[in-house]
Structures are given as structure tokens and as C-alpha cells.
């Protein structure tokens, strides 16, 4: 496997940032510092990190309600992100979007999206833009297993395939749509087989193996860049936390502690740390240094968010129309 | 006298002009390409601009309306055609939760310069799922401009304006008006979205109308003039931005308001105008506000029932008679 060491280290760092950010949000939410809803990405970090490592600023992503990981991996800055979670004026959306709507069009982040399946057609549109005006660039659409049952999944994959758009559909199959398990919501186990129905390639990978995700996404993205059309890439993973912070006992109403524990043991970061050690890419000390550095950065983002003002009430009437 | 063309041709000219001027402008919709659109509004455009810029889409309203949102956010100016307004319902998430929200929800970081063309109206025997006039629903959603041109002249100018606007615009046409003819300049021009037009000044009774109801109001006004009643007819031309001042100024002058719009009575455009007048010009009113509107029923297929659905000149005259009782 021929991945530059710099990229390997970057994959690790991205996963650590996402994990540390989410753990901090978990704590801040529990202590009542962050209002609203928080849907954490803990356990799924390898997917955002592995996919987005193949993208540049001129490539686009659409994200989901569980979007912190995607936007971090796509290059979003932690300070305006954290400020947005706090609803502060210095946030990415001036505090008007919150956790579910972080966007930075300049970085190609077309927004996290509060509607399950809502991002799929938007990614198709970004793919249209790329095809018409920016050949060689791509749009990546993140969505969940449950969204693959939404009409927008069918419409978007069909549309992208028939027009050979440079879109990569990344299905994060974490086994649940809120409380409903995959076995309850669809009669298949590998969502990637649906690709055949649209005449596009489909592939299922271990979503907790960052290198597998990176390589599979890289191939799909390269095909899209070359004008060879869309791909459906399914990454199997698991969400450790409940659907949202506040979901009792991390989803104890619909899954067992043992199930959760089994997946915690498949932690994508621990796994990658073992790989990095074994292959002498990074020492334990170097890895710890990453965690320490990230911790500092996140602490800085919290200070920034807490010290920032709320938007003035007049802000409510801004940006309704352009 | 300048050139006379149809409403559909005027729209076609606007599209061709904008596509010629700006390669970000493209068209998507069902049968808009070789077929030229179900009402021939896009006729000839695919031959002229190619299949990539005049795209026949699958029957997938969510995909192409949402696709337009994504394309608009990334630098394009898409114009999508929804064959009948009735079909927009299958793309409502894209319209309400995505298109209308992006600019605000992202704190002004994203713009969504796109146009959705729809047509409303009964009268073509298309029954309950192809004849509705529920455009007022969208007036309730902040973040969408709503244009309603009632003449070929305004159709061309307002569509050019809509395509150049940085906001999402719902462009509401009336399917019975595509063959209406009127004077339309050959050159390009714009007509603002959000400015009502006093199409007939008068001092006794205010009628605020949209689309096909404007011509009916003018006909009634001419007839009533013979009876010594001087009606003022305002073509509202847009539901958002709503030209409140134009309506209030007229109501303050005449002390009356009749609204005329084909949408069902309950919650139609007239309801908002009536509430606004009650809030801001109650002291001026000398008579009840009357809404001339479709009945609160689906549109029936059977021709006499369908005709009875459509607000008529007689309905307007009845409204005028009622108002006159108070003057």
C-alpha cells in the first residue's frame, strides 16, 4: 500500500481532532453549556477522515445532522465551529445555524443538513456545477443507512448516474436510524448492492479502517474526477453514543451494552494507533503529542466560543433574503 | 406599436437572453428539451444551447429542485420548470427546508440564486392534481421571492429579473395565460419583483388582483365605469416581497378592498392582504373586505364544475355590489 507518510499522519490527526472535539462537546452538552441538539460522530471518525483526505478546497461535500466530523475533516476551523455550537456571533453561521447547519462554501462545505436524505440532491447539484464549470472537481455526499430508504436516495443516484456526474455517495452505515436497526428498516445488509440498480459501481468497506476508507474513496473520487461518473461507497461502522446527546443510556432502549462494547473494542483510532506503532510510522510519544496539541486547540476553541457575544437581536432579520 | 407575442414566447425570450448573457444559467425540468416544455416555454432552447444547458431530467422533482439548490450554491443560476405547481409537493423538503433556508441558516455564507417556474390554474380540464393554485402556501415561508406576472410584458421582464436575482424565486405563471398576447419589446429589460402596479387608477373601490384575475378586474372596472363607479385595479405582481405600501395607499384612498386570486378561499393571498389592511388601515375602511377566490374545494374534472371553480367576472361584480352597499 503506497500512501505517503504525511497523509497517514494526517489521517491520524484528523481522527484525533474529531474524537477530542466530540468528547468535549459531549461534556459541554452534559453541563448545559451548549444548547439544542448534538449528534456525535464518536466511533465513525475513520470515514470522514479517510474520505476527505482525498479532497481539496475546490471539491464539495454535503453533510448530515451528524456532521461535525465531516466538516472538521474538510478543513473547518475549530473556533468558528465551536462558537456556532454555542450560538455565538463568531460562529460559522453567525450562530444562526447551530450544530446541524455548519457550512463554509469557500471550503466546499455545503452545509450539514438537518433533514435525513436532504443533502443527496444538493450534492447532485454541486456535481452538476463541477461538470459544467469546474471539470476535475467532485462532490462527496455523506448520508446514513436510514437515508438510503428515502426517495432522495433513489432520485439522486439515478440522476447522477444518468448524467455521469462527479459525485461520490458515501453511505455511513452505523446500523441505526435513530432507534430503528438496519434489520428493521431494510431487507438487505450491504447497501452498496443498490448501486447496481443505478448502473454505477458500489463497494462496501470496513468503515472503522481508515486506510480502507481512504483507498476506496480515493478510487471512487478519481473515477469521478476523470468523468467516469458516480460511485456508491458504503462504510460500515457504529455510533457509540446515542442518536443525540440525551438519548437515554446511549440508546439503551434499542441496543445492548454488550453490543456497544463490542464496537468500542473496534475503535477506529485504537486500531490505527496499533497500525502506526507496528509499522513504525509514529511512536506512542508522537501520538500522545498529537492528542496534547489537539487538546490545546480545542480548549482554545471553547475559550473563543465562551468569550464571543451572542448575535444581536437585529441579526434575526438579516440574511432572510440576499 | 411594438411587437406582439404570447406570454409563453415572452418567457422563452427571457430564458434565451439570460442564457446568452451568462453561461451560469441553465434549465432543468421534465420534457424541457426536445419537447420544448409541456407549454412550449422552452421551445427551441435545447437546439440553441445544447443538452447540457437545457436538461431533460428524470421524473425526479426532489433531485432536480435539490440539484438546482446545490448548483446555485456553487456558482450556477439554474432555472427549473415544475410542469404543474401540483408536482412541487414531491420536492417540498428541497423548497422549504433547503432552498429557502440556506442563506439565513448559514449566516449569509451561501446564496441560492435559482428560479422555480410553476404554473397554476384551472380551466384546462386537468382535474384536481394538475389545476391547483396553492402559491400562497409559499408566502408563509420566509426566504422565497414569489413573482406573478400577469402580462407577456411583465413575464419577460420579471423572468430576467428573477434569473439575475441572488435569491430563490418561485415564478408563478398561469397555464391559461401562455397563449395570451401582448406587446413585448424585443430588447432585454427587467421588471422589479415586489412592486405592484396600478393598472387602472380609480377613486371608489380598490381591487388587488393576480395573474388572470387582473384582466377580469379590468373588464369589470370598465363596465362599472359606465355605472359611475370608479374602480382602481392593482396588479400585485409579487407575493414576496409584498408591496404593502401600494395596497395600503389605495385602500386609504378608496376605503375599500376586494382581492382577486384563483387560490382557494381559505388562506389565499387575499387573507394576508385583509389582515394587513386590518392591522394598518382599519380606520380607512368603509366596507367589508371581500375576497374573490376559488372555493374551498379541489378542482373537479366535469367541465361545468371546473368552470364554477374559477373566480369569474360575475364574482367580481357581486363583490363590487356588496361593497357599494356600504359606500
Image (cartoon, coloured by chain):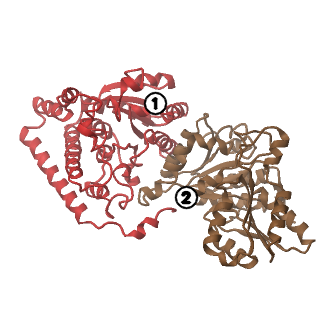
Check the image and report above or below for B327 versus A117. below
| Place of residue B183 in the rendered image (x, y in percent of width and height, measured from the top left) | 82, 61
Left or right of A253, for residue B163: right
Whole-angstrom CA distance, mark 2 to mark 1, is 31 Å
Q: Quadrant location of residue A212?
A: top left
Residue A16 visible? The answer is yes
Q: Which chain does tag 2 point to?
A: B
Front-most of B133 and B116?
Answer: B133
State which mark lies toward you, 2 or 1. Answer: 1
Q: Quadrant of the C terminus of chain B?
A: bottom right
Label disc, if present, on residue A149 of the rendered structure:
1
How many residues crowd mark 1 within 10 Å: few (<14), some (14–19), many (20+)? some
The residue indicated by pointer 2 is B167
Label 2: state its secondary structure.
loop
Which chain is brown in the rendering?
B
Residue reaching furthest left? A285
> In the rendered picture, chain A carries what hue?
red
| Place of residue A120 in the rendered image (x, y in percent of width and height, measured from the top left) | 46, 39
Q: Are marks 2 and 1 in contact (CB under 8 Å)?
A: no
| Place of residue A77 in the rendered image (x, y in percent of width and height, measured from the top left) | 28, 54
Q: Quadrant of the N terminus of chain B?
A: bottom right
Amino acid at each position: 500500500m503506497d500512501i505517503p507518510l504525511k497523509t497517514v499522519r494526517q489521517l491520524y490527526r484528523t481522527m484525533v481532532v474529531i474524537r477530542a472535539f466530540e468528547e468535549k462537546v459531549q461534556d459541554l452538552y452534559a453541563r448545559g453549556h451548549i444548547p439544542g441538539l448534538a449528534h456525535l460522530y464518536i466511533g465513525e471518525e475513520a470515514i470522514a477522515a479517510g474520505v476527505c483526505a482525498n479532497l481539496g478546497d475546490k471539491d464539495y461535500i454535503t453533510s448530515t445532522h451528524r456532521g461535525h466530523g465531516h466538516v472538521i475533516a474538510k478543513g473547518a476551523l475549530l473556533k468558528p465551529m465551536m462558537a456556532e455550537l454555542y450560538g455565538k456571533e463568531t460562529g460559522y453561521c453567525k450562530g444562526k445555524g447551530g450544530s446541524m447547519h455548519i457550512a463554509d462554501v469557500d471550503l466546499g462545505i455545503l452545509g450539514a443538513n438537518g433533514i435525513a436524505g436532504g443533502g443527496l440532491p444538493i450534492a447532485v447539484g454541486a456535481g452538476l456545477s463541477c461538470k459544467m464549470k469546474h471539470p476535475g472537481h467532485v462532490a462527496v455526499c455523506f448520508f446514513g443507512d436510514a437515508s438510503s430508504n428515502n426517495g432522495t436516495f433513489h432520485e439522486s443516484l439515478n440522476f447522477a448516474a444518468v448524467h455521469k456526474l462527479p459525485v461520490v455517495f458515501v453511505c455511513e452505515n452505523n446500523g441505526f436510524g435513530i432507534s430503528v436497526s438496519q434489520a428493521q428498516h431494510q431487507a438487505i445488509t450491504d447497501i452498496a448492492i443498490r448501486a447496481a440498480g443505478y448502473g454505477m459501481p458500489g463497494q462496501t468497506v470496513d468503515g472503522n479502517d481508515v486506510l480502507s476508507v481512504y483507498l476506496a474513496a480515493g478510487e471512487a473520487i478519481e473515477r469521478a474526477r476523470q468523468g467516469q461518473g458516480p460511485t456508491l461507497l458504503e462504510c460500515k461502522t457504529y455510533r457509540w453514543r446515542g442518536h443525540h446527546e440525551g438519548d437515554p443510556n446511549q440508546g439503551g432502549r434499542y441496543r445492548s451494552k454488550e453490543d456497544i462494547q463490542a464496537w468500542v473494542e473496534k475503535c477506529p483510532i485504537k486500531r490505527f494507533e496499533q497500525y502506526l506503532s507496528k509499522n513504525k510510522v509514529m511512536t506512542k510519544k508522537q501520538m500522545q503529542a498529537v492528542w496534547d496539541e489537539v487538546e490545546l486547540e480545542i480548549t482554545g476553541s471553547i475559550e473563543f466560543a465562551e468569550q464571543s457575544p451572542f448575535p444581536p437581536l437585529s441579526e434575526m432579520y438579516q440574511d432572510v433574503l440576499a | 406599436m411594438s411587437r406582439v407575442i404570447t406570454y409563453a414566447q415572452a418567457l422563452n425570450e427571457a430564458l434565451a437572453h439570460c442564457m446568452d448573457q451568462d453561461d451560469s444559467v441553465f434549465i432543468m425540468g421534465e420534457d424541457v428539451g426536445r419537447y420544448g416544455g409541456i407549454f412550449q416555454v422552452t421551445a427551441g432552447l435545447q437546439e440553441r444551447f445544447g443538452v447540457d444547458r437545457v436538461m431533460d431530467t428524470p421524473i425526479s422533482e426532489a433531485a432536480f429542485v435539490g440539484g438546482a439548490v446545490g448548483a446555485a450554491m456553487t456558482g450556477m443560476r439554474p432555472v427549473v420548470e415544475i410542469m404543474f405547481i401540483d408536482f412541487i409537493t414531491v420536492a417540498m423538503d428541497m423548497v422549504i427546508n433547503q432552498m429557502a433556508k440556506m442563506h439565513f441558516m448559514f449566516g449569509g455564507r451561501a446564496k441560492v440564486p435559482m428560479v422555480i417556474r410553476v404554473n397554476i390554474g384551472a380551466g384546462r380540464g386537468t382535474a384536481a392534481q394538475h389545476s391547483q393554485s396553492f402559491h400562497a402556501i409559499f408566502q408563509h415561508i420566509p426566504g422565497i421571492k414569489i413573482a406573478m406576472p400577469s402580462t407577456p410584458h411583465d413575464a419577460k421582464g420579471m423572468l430576467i429579473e428573477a434569473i439575475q436575482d441572488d435569491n430563490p424565486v418561485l415564478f408563478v405563471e398561469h397555464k391559461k395565460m401562455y397563449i395570451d398576447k401582448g406587446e413585448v419589446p424585443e430588447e432585454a429589460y427587467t421588471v422589479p419583483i415586489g412592486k405592484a402596479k396600478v393598472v387602472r387608477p380609480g377613486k371608489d373601490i380598490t381591487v388587488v388582483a393576480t395573474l388572470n384575475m387582473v384582466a377580469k378586474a379590468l373588464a369589470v372596472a370598465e363596465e362599472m365605469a359606465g355605472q359611475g363607479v370608479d374602480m382602481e385595479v392593482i396588479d400585485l405582481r409579487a407575493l414576496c416581497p409584498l408591496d404593502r405600501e401600494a395596497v395600503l395607499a389605495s385602500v386609504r384612498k378608496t376605503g375599500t378592498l376586494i382581492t382577486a386570486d384563483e387560490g382557494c378561499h381559505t388562506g389565499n393571498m387575499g387573507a394576508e392582504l385583509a389582515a394587513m389592511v386590518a392591522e394598518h388601515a382599519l380606520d380607512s375602511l368603509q366596507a367589508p373586505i371581500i375576497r374573490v377566490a376559488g372555493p374551498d374545494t379541489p378542482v373537479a374534472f366535469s367541465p361545468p364544475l371546473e368552470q364554477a371553480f374559477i373566480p369569474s367576472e360575475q364574482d367580481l361584480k357581486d363583490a363590487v355590489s356588496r361593497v357599494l352597499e356600504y359606500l
